[in-house]
Image (cartoon, rainbow, N blue to C red):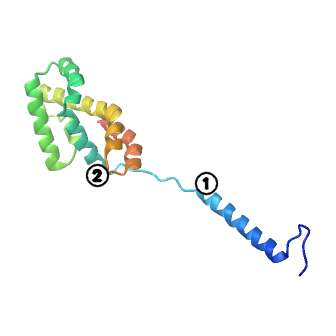
Amino acid sequence: MRMNYSGIFPSEFDSIQRRKNTRRKKMNTKLQEPKRKFTLTPKIMRNFGKAICEFMLSKKAIPSLDQLIKKENLDYKEFYDFLIQSVEFFEQNGNFIALIIPQMTDDNKIKACKRVIKELSRIFVKYYSLNWILKSQDLKKECYLKCRIKVLNAINLC
């Protein structure tokens, strides 16, 4: 067999070149992975809605709830009655956005309650949702982290 300039046989040289090329291909495929787009599905919004409802009924919401209720001139008992009815409505229908959109037929007290619920849901998504996502075991964490801002935008648009 004939040797090339580097002192190795041509068959060995070819195998070394093939190995180098496969390494380069593997490196290039890792760098060029397509980015996944995460869409805000009804399931994600429903899960966020459940977490927001749990937050509103928990003790963590009390400091911000006090300020919001005083700002809207509401009574605690009226608000909690409305909140419990809203949570039951949400559990039946699964549509969280319907809880925070005021209807034309609603009176001023109900509109004020819906504004408080909207503010509490903003507070949850901004400050508490990250902890909720990272503590959860069965959620697709990456998807929920990416959709967090979309949920906040959906709440703000209502």
Element type where label 1 sits in the image? helix
Q: CA distance from mark 1 to mark 2?
A: 31 Å
Identify the disc placed on residue 31: 1
Q: Is residue 99 above or below residue 74?
A: below
Which amino acid, by three-letter code, is at mark 1? Leu
Residue depicted at x 89% and y 82%: 1
Which amino acid, by three-letter code, is at mark 2? Lys
Residue depicted at x 21% and y 32%: 117
Nearest the viewer among 104 and 120 is 120
Identify the disc placed on residue 67: none
Image quadrant holding the C terminus, namely top left
Closer to us: mark 1 or mark 2? 1
Quarter of image, res 82: top left
Q: Position of residue 129 (x, y in %)?
A: 32, 37
Q: Position of residue 50 (x, y in %)?
A: 22, 43
> Residue 130: in sight, yes or no?
yes
Would you call the spot at circle 2 few (<14 residues within 10 Å), some (14-19), or many (20 or more)? Answer: few
Q: Position of residue 146 (x, y in %)?
A: 42, 44
